[in-house]
Amino acid sequence: MGTSTLHDFAGTVDAQPFALERHIDDETGRMWWSGRIEVAVLEMDTGIDKRNHNMHEMLTADLHPRIVADFRRIEDELLAASRAGGGSSLTFDLTIRDVTHPVVARISEWVETAEEAGFDATFEVSLSSFGLEAPVVLGLLRVGDVVSVRAHVLLTPPPQAAALRPSPERPREAHDREA
Protein backbone atom coordinates (compact mmCIF):
# COMPACT_ATOMS: atom_id res chain seq x y z
CA MET A 1 0.00 0.00 0.00
CA GLY A 2 1.41 3.34 -1.00
CA THR A 3 0.33 6.88 -0.26
CA SER A 4 0.42 10.06 -2.27
CA THR A 5 -0.68 13.64 -1.75
CA LEU A 6 -3.91 12.78 -3.60
CA HIS A 7 -4.87 9.28 -2.40
CA ASP A 8 -3.60 5.90 -1.27
CA PHE A 9 -2.97 3.16 -3.81
CA ALA A 10 -2.25 -0.56 -3.85
CA GLY A 11 -0.33 -2.89 -6.10
CA THR A 12 0.38 -6.56 -6.61
CA VAL A 13 3.24 -8.77 -7.73
CA ASP A 14 3.95 -12.49 -7.57
CA ALA A 15 7.29 -13.77 -6.30
CA GLN A 16 9.35 -16.01 -8.51
CA PRO A 17 9.33 -19.68 -7.40
CA PHE A 18 11.82 -20.19 -4.57
CA ALA A 19 13.15 -22.90 -2.28
CA LEU A 20 13.95 -22.91 1.41
CA GLU A 21 16.97 -24.90 2.49
CA ARG A 22 16.95 -26.75 5.80
CA HIS A 23 20.08 -26.66 7.99
CA ILE A 24 21.03 -28.37 11.25
CA ASP A 25 23.40 -26.58 13.63
CA ASP A 26 26.28 -29.01 14.29
CA GLU A 27 26.80 -27.79 17.85
CA THR A 28 23.22 -27.47 19.10
CA GLY A 29 21.31 -29.76 16.76
CA ARG A 30 18.77 -26.96 16.21
CA MET A 31 17.10 -26.73 12.83
CA TRP A 32 16.94 -23.52 10.79
CA TRP A 33 16.09 -22.49 7.24
CA SER A 34 17.48 -20.12 4.62
CA GLY A 35 16.26 -18.95 1.25
CA ARG A 36 16.03 -16.19 -1.32
CA ILE A 37 12.87 -14.68 -2.74
CA GLU A 38 12.94 -12.57 -5.89
CA VAL A 39 10.31 -10.29 -7.38
CA ALA A 40 10.43 -9.12 -11.00
CA VAL A 41 10.18 -5.31 -10.98
CA LEU A 42 8.38 -5.18 -14.34
CA GLU A 43 5.66 -7.47 -12.95
CA MET A 44 4.81 -5.00 -10.18
CA ASP A 45 1.35 -3.62 -11.03
CA THR A 46 -0.65 -0.80 -9.43
CA GLY A 47 -3.48 -1.00 -11.95
CA ILE A 48 -2.57 2.31 -13.64
CA ASP A 49 -0.14 2.15 -16.56
CA LYS A 50 1.41 5.62 -16.05
CA ARG A 51 1.96 4.96 -12.33
CA ASN A 52 3.50 1.57 -13.19
CA HIS A 53 5.82 3.27 -15.68
CA ASN A 54 6.93 5.83 -13.07
CA MET A 55 7.50 3.08 -10.50
CA HIS A 56 9.51 0.91 -12.92
CA GLU A 57 11.56 3.96 -13.91
CA MET A 58 12.23 4.88 -10.25
CA LEU A 59 13.40 1.31 -9.60
CA THR A 60 15.52 1.34 -12.82
CA ALA A 61 13.99 -1.95 -13.90
CA ASP A 62 16.20 -2.06 -16.99
CA LEU A 63 19.36 -2.17 -14.83
CA HIS A 64 17.93 -3.83 -11.70
CA PRO A 65 15.18 -6.20 -12.85
CA ARG A 66 14.65 -7.89 -9.46
CA ILE A 67 13.98 -6.98 -5.85
CA VAL A 68 15.58 -9.61 -3.60
CA ALA A 69 14.83 -10.76 -0.06
CA ASP A 70 17.55 -12.94 1.52
CA PHE A 71 16.53 -15.02 4.52
CA ARG A 72 19.78 -16.16 6.11
CA ARG A 73 18.50 -17.86 9.24
CA ILE A 74 14.85 -18.63 9.94
CA GLU A 75 14.79 -20.38 13.29
CA ASP A 76 12.42 -23.31 13.63
CA GLU A 77 11.33 -21.88 17.00
CA LEU A 78 10.11 -18.75 15.19
CA LEU A 79 7.93 -20.89 12.97
CA ALA A 80 6.65 -22.80 16.00
CA ALA A 81 5.63 -19.53 17.70
CA SER A 82 3.76 -18.47 14.57
CA ARG A 83 2.05 -21.85 14.33
CA ALA A 84 0.87 -21.46 17.92
CA GLY A 85 -0.84 -18.19 16.99
CA GLY A 86 1.50 -15.99 18.99
CA GLY A 87 2.77 -14.09 16.00
CA SER A 88 6.43 -13.38 15.55
CA SER A 89 8.84 -11.35 13.49
CA LEU A 90 11.23 -12.34 10.76
CA THR A 91 14.39 -10.42 9.84
CA PHE A 92 15.75 -10.54 6.30
CA ASP A 93 17.98 -8.52 3.98
CA LEU A 94 16.07 -6.60 1.31
CA THR A 95 17.90 -5.46 -1.82
CA ILE A 96 16.34 -2.81 -4.03
CA ARG A 97 18.51 -1.74 -6.96
CA ASP A 98 22.01 -1.94 -5.48
CA VAL A 99 21.16 -1.06 -1.86
CA THR A 100 20.61 -3.68 0.86
CA HIS A 101 19.06 -3.09 4.29
CA PRO A 102 17.80 -5.40 7.03
CA VAL A 103 14.02 -5.44 7.33
CA VAL A 104 11.81 -6.86 10.07
CA ALA A 105 8.47 -8.35 8.99
CA ARG A 106 5.63 -9.21 11.34
CA ILE A 107 4.34 -12.74 10.77
CA SER A 108 0.63 -13.45 11.27
CA GLU A 109 -2.24 -15.59 10.02
CA TRP A 110 -0.24 -18.84 10.08
CA VAL A 111 -2.16 -21.72 8.46
CA GLU A 112 -0.75 -25.21 8.09
CA THR A 113 -2.14 -28.40 6.55
CA ALA A 114 -0.54 -31.70 5.62
CA GLU A 115 0.05 -30.33 2.11
CA GLU A 116 1.10 -26.71 2.63
CA ALA A 117 1.73 -23.85 5.03
CA GLY A 118 1.02 -20.18 4.66
CA PHE A 119 1.27 -16.89 6.50
CA ASP A 120 1.15 -13.14 6.02
CA ALA A 121 4.26 -11.00 6.40
CA THR A 122 3.90 -7.23 6.79
CA PHE A 123 6.66 -4.63 6.77
CA GLU A 124 7.38 -1.07 5.69
CA VAL A 125 9.96 0.17 3.22
CA SER A 126 11.29 3.74 3.14
CA LEU A 127 12.04 4.62 -0.46
CA SER A 128 14.64 7.22 0.53
CA SER A 129 16.55 4.70 2.65
CA PHE A 130 17.15 2.74 -0.55
CA GLY A 131 18.29 5.86 -2.41
CA LEU A 132 15.00 6.14 -4.29
CA GLU A 133 13.25 9.42 -5.03
CA ALA A 134 9.48 9.06 -4.97
CA PRO A 135 7.82 9.98 -8.28
CA VAL A 136 6.18 13.40 -8.64
CA VAL A 137 3.35 14.04 -11.12
CA LEU A 138 2.68 17.55 -12.50
CA GLY A 139 4.94 18.98 -9.82
CA LEU A 140 2.12 18.57 -7.28
CA LEU A 141 1.34 14.93 -6.63
CA ARG A 142 4.05 13.08 -4.75
CA VAL A 143 4.18 9.45 -3.70
CA GLY A 144 4.87 9.08 0.03
CA ASP A 145 8.27 7.87 1.19
CA VAL A 146 7.00 4.86 3.16
CA VAL A 147 5.39 1.92 1.38
CA SER A 148 3.57 -0.73 3.42
CA VAL A 149 4.06 -4.26 2.11
CA ARG A 150 1.81 -7.22 2.87
CA ALA A 151 3.02 -10.53 1.46
CA HIS A 152 0.79 -13.58 1.41
CA VAL A 153 3.26 -16.48 1.54
CA LEU A 154 2.28 -20.02 0.55
CA LEU A 155 4.83 -22.79 1.08
CA THR A 156 4.36 -26.10 -0.72
CA PRO A 157 6.75 -29.03 -0.98
CA PRO A 158 8.51 -29.59 -4.29
CA PRO A 159 7.03 -32.44 -6.36
CA GLN A 160 9.81 -34.89 -5.45
CA ALA A 161 9.22 -34.28 -1.70
CA ALA A 162 5.54 -35.15 -2.09
CA ALA A 163 6.55 -38.48 -3.62
CA LEU A 164 8.59 -39.31 -0.49
CA ARG A 165 5.71 -38.83 1.95
CA PRO A 166 4.59 -42.02 3.69
CA SER A 167 1.42 -43.54 2.33
CA PRO A 168 -0.86 -46.19 3.84
CA GLU A 169 0.81 -48.80 1.60
CA ARG A 170 4.36 -47.89 2.72
CA PRO A 171 5.45 -48.32 6.32
CA ARG A 172 6.88 -45.16 7.92
CA GLU A 173 10.23 -46.83 8.62
CA ALA A 174 10.81 -47.36 4.90
CA HIS A 175 9.97 -43.72 4.23
CA ASP A 176 12.37 -42.50 6.92
CA ARG A 177 15.24 -44.52 5.46
CA GLU A 178 14.62 -43.09 1.97
CA ALA A 179 14.42 -39.47 3.07
Image (cartoon, grey):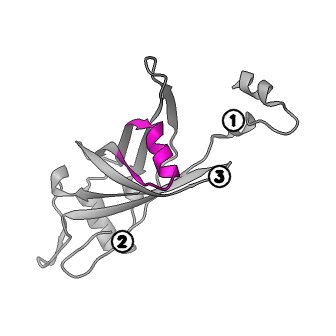
Whether residue 14 sits left or right of residue 115 in the image: it is: left
In the rendered image, residue 122 lying in the magenta stretch gets the answer no
Q: CA distance from mark 1 to mark 3?
A: 18 Å
Q: Quadrant of residue 176?
A: top right
Q: Check disc 2 and report its element: helix, strand or loop.
A: loop
Q: Residues within 10 Å of mark 2 (few under 14, many from 20)?
A: few
Q: Is 49 or 10 nearer to us in this picture?
A: 10
Tell me: residue 79, above or below residue 43.
Answer: above
Residue type of the residue flagged with mark 2 = Ala
Q: CA distance from mark 2 to mark 1?
A: 36 Å
Observer able to see residue 62: no
Q: Are marks 2 and 3 in contact (CB under 8 Å)?
A: no
Q: Position of residue 91 (x, y in %)?
A: 33, 44
Q: Are marks 2 and 1 in contact (CB under 8 Å)?
A: no
Q: Position of residue 16 (x, y in %)?
A: 48, 48
In the rendered image, residue 85 lying in the magenta stretch gets the answer yes
Q: Residues within 10 Å of mark 3 (few under 14, many from 20)?
A: few
Q: Position of residue 131 (x, y in %)?
A: 16, 51
- Which is in the foreground here, disc 1 or disc 3? 3
- Identify which residue is drawn at 23% across, 59% down: 58
Q: Quadrant of residue 178?
A: top right
Along the polypeptide, which appears first: circle 2 or circle 3?
Answer: 2
Q: Of the numbered discs in the image, which one, if any, rests on residue 113?
A: 3
Q: Check disc 1 and report its element: helix, strand or loop.
A: helix
Q: Of the numbered discs in the image, which one, if any, rests on residue 160?
A: 1
Residue type of the residue flagged with mark 1 = Gln
- Quadrant where the C terminus is found in the figure: top right
Residue located beneath label 2 in the image = 10
* Magenta span of residues: 72-90
- Identify which residue is drawn at 85% across, 39% down: 168
